[in-house]
Every structure is written in C-alpha cells, then in structure tokens.
Image (cartoon, rainbow, N blue to C red):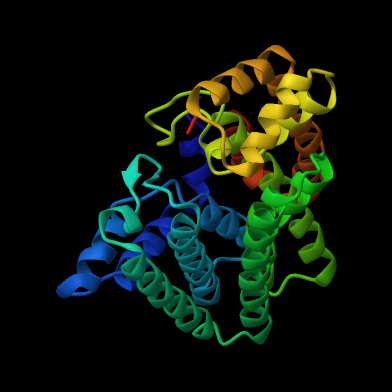
Amino acid sequence: MDYLSIIKRPIEKELNNFSELFNNCLSEEEGLLGDVLSHIRQRGGKRMRPILMFLTANNYGQVSDVTQNAALGLELLHTASLVHDDVVDESNERRGQASVNASYNNKVAVLVGDYILSTALLRVALSNNKRIVQSLAELGRILAAGEILQLSNISNQEISEESYYQVIEKKTASLFEACSALGAISVGASDEDIEMAKKFGHRIGMIFQIRDDIFDYYDSKEIGKPTGNDMTEGKLTLPVIYALTNSNYESMQTLAKKVKAGTINSDEIAVLVEFTKQSGGIEYAERKMEEFAKEAQKYVDECVKPELKDAFKAYLEYVIQRNI
C-alpha cells in the first residue's frame, strides 16, 4: 500500500508550500556556506515531522502562516541537531549521503549547524506566538539533554530498558510530541486537545525510534549505515538489551561491555547481532512498537475528524512498517 500518498493527500498544498519555504531558508548564492547548505538540501527526506504538524493543525482548524513558521522552525532545529549529532558521533553518512563533517570538516559542520539553528529561531519568531516560541526553545534544550544523556549512558555499565527509553524519549519522542502540540497550538486548540495530540506524537516518536534501532541489525544501503553501527558508536538499543537481560551468556555480557568501552571489533559485533536475533530481540522490539501503536490508534479513533482518519491511520502504519 502506498501509505505516503494517503498521508499527504489532505495536506498536499501545505506540504508543497513548506518544501519551497524550507529550501529558501537553506539557500545562499555562493561561497562555502552556500555549498554546504546545498549539500544538506539534497538530503531531502519524507518530511514526516511537518506532515504530522499539518495533519494535526487541520484536525483542530486549518493550516496557517503560523503553522508554517512553526513547522519551519522545528524542521530547521531538527536539521541543525542532525548536523551536530554527526560531529559528536563521528558519523560519515546520514541516510546514504555523506555527512557534512565527512564532506567538509568538523569546524564547518558545527558552524553551519549553528547557522541553521539561528535560522530556526528566526522562522519561529515570525509565528508571533509566544507559546510556540517557548515550546521550540524547550525542545532544543530537551534534544541537547538527550544527546548528553546518551553519551553518559555509554560509560554507564548498567544495561536496562529504562535507560534506553529515557534517551529515546528525549532524542526522538520529544520531536514528534512537539509536532503534534505545535500543530494544535498554531490553530488555537484547547489545552485538553493539545495534551491529547501531544501524547499521540509521543507514541509515534517511540515507535519511530524503535523501528530505526531495529534497522541497525540489518545491512541496508537505503538506510545508509552498516549493520551494528550503533554498537560501533557504543550504543546498546532495545533488541540487544532484551537479549542480554533475558539470557545468562557471560560471553555476550563481555561483548556488551566492550561495546560500551569502545573496544569491540566488527567480527564481535556480528556475533552480538546474531545473538540478538536468535534470542528474540527483534520480535520483542516489534511487540513494544505494537503496544505504543494500540495507544496511538485510540487517539485516531476517538479524536480525529472522519475526513482525516485515513491519513492518520496511514501515518501510524507507515511509521510501524517503514523500511527506510
């Protein structure tokens, strides 16, 4: 099923306007900055975050210039955070494309990330909505805190689902929460409706990140990272956490410690990946996605306008089943 077509159908015009405005925000005529921004624009993406914001806005009202500026602010903030994250993680690729730090260098990446962040602040200020500005500023704090928490967890020898969820709530769920909340705020929805939308966004974000983490156990050129890349960076995600906490293999615990110490090699990662698959780690992570999906579906059933239900259902299904 072509989920993306169903998702975009009610907001096609708004999304086209957004894409044009977004590209304009990342356009410079010449020089190094122009080259780097052009490199980032080519990355594209499915625009899942602004799509969620527009759908939510239409559910409680109608997409306006306030909504567009909020969406631009959030997507630019997200883009800046990815540029900075690639520096922190020393990543060479982002979704199959060379990262900014790999194509240029860390100094350029940090400065361009700062430029994009400032552009995000400028766009959200144009919403002339104090609550939206405050929400986006708080989101920036949460995303940074999530990165710091993830770094601290690498050196923490404790392996637990709780620690994993704490990180992804800040790093990913917070973004989708903000999309839903800002979409509702931008059209003057009630506080009760904003809170309901926010919870839906949170569940979408949790599903999105768990699916992303499952990708790491399979090799895919489309995804743009080799199998076990998270482990190479010192990260233990939900599938392997489940496998480790539900088995007594001392050798696997030793490999997990090597992941956190940054001393594991590619052959050992392959062993840990295969152990995770054989121990039901992937199936467990998929069950967790389904648990979040059931709660998200309640929102679609009870809070979404009839004419938007198909788009919301398709959005939820796409996040669960996507392969990139």
Q: Is residue 136 above or below residue 165?
A: below
Percent across and percent down for residue 45 are 41, 48
Identify the residue shown where x is 49% and y is 85%.
Answer: 126
Task: Provide residue 178's location: percent of width, then percent of height.
Answer: 66, 63
Comparing 283 with 176, the one in front is 283
Q: Horizontal and vertical percent for residue 124?
A: 52, 79
In this rendering, does residue 274 appear at all? yes
The residue depicted at 52 percent of the width and 58 percent of the height is: 50
Task: From the viewer's side, name the closer residue of 313 and 75.
Answer: 75
Looking at the image, residue 1 sits to the left or right of residue 242; the answer is left
In the depicted structure, whether residue 231 falls above or below residue 178: above
Of all residues shown, which one is farthest toward the top?
Answer: 278
Looking at this view, name the residue that lies furthest to the left.
30
Observer-nearest of 196 and 101: 101
Residue name at image x 62 percent, y 60 percent: 147
> Residue 235, can we see it?
no
Q: Position of residue 261 (x, y in %)?
A: 63, 43
**Among the 4 quarters of the image, the one containing residue 57:** bottom right
Above or below, comparing residue 46 to residue 16 in the picture: above
- Residue at 37% x, 60% y: name it: 19
Q: In this rendering, is residue 32 above or below 86?
A: below
* Residue 242, image quadrant: top right
